[in-house]
Amino acid sequence: MQGAALAALPAALLPATRASARPRAVDYPLAEWVPASTSNYTAANRPSTYPVDYVIVHVTQETYADTLAIFQNPAKKVSAHYVVRSEDGHIAQCVRERNVGWHAGNWNYNTRSIGIEHEGWVDQPEYFTDAMYEQSALLTSAICETYDIPKDRKHIIGHVEVPGTDHTDPGPHWDWPRYIRLVNSA
């Protein structure tokens, strides 16, 4: 059909748009979209505007629900791309990967990283469940593959390793050898 004939067809008779043609709500298919306030991150077009070279591992020092509420509060001026729940490894995406999350406390590292928060406290290792490690490792592996980031400790770092930070997370109970092994086997 052409021209006016096509225009005259009722919309119900036209083929539906393919579901895959719609933009995805999340960058990681297993994540739930729980958006941070637009006041808590910088809109960007990464990796065009900034290369993504790191994954930064954080521990929330809050509950999962409270962390999401903090990221949604425009007065807080903080966000990470993802939050992983302790109990079952459920993942929320709060900031699109193309945007700059405000998680590292160092602008250069913010622009060049994806931040993943993990529910729990650095001095309470019981929060670091098998489900959390496994789901977070799958996420980190996918991020590394997307941005061609080596799956090693030089590129998957803790918040404590960001220059100029005053944070200690993920803390002494985070099992780095296990985590990197899981990332590499994902």
Image (tube, rainbow, N blue to C red):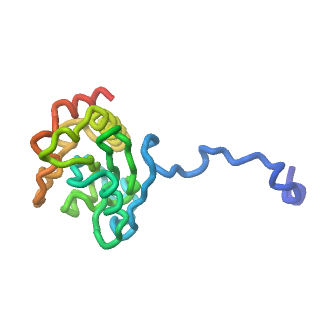
Which residue sits at x=36%, y=53%?
Answer: 47
Q: x, y (%) of residue 91? A: 37, 45
Q: x, y (%) of residue 149? A: 28, 41
Furthest toward the bottom, the residue is: 75
Q: x, y (%) of residue 66? A: 31, 58
Which residue sits at x=29%, y=42%?
Answer: 86
Furthest toward the top, the residue is: 185
Task: Specify the quadrant of the image occupied by residue 49.
Answer: bottom left
The residue nearer to you, when weighing 142 against 7, is 142
On screen, residue 73 versus residue 2, left or right, reads: left
Task: Specify the quadrant of the image occupied by residue 132.
Answer: top left
On screen, residue 117 versus residue 45, left or right, reads: left
For the image, the number of numbered tags is 0
Q: x, y (%) of residue 87? A: 31, 40
Which residue sits at x=33%, y=67%?
Answer: 40
On screen, residue 100 versus residue 30, left or right, reads: left
Classify the position of the C terminus by image quarter: top left
The residue nearer to you, when weighing 103 against 60, is 60
The residue nearer to you, when weighing 153 against 165, is 165
Which residue sits at x=19%, y=62%?
Answer: 105
The residue nearer to you, when weighing 93 against 123, is 123
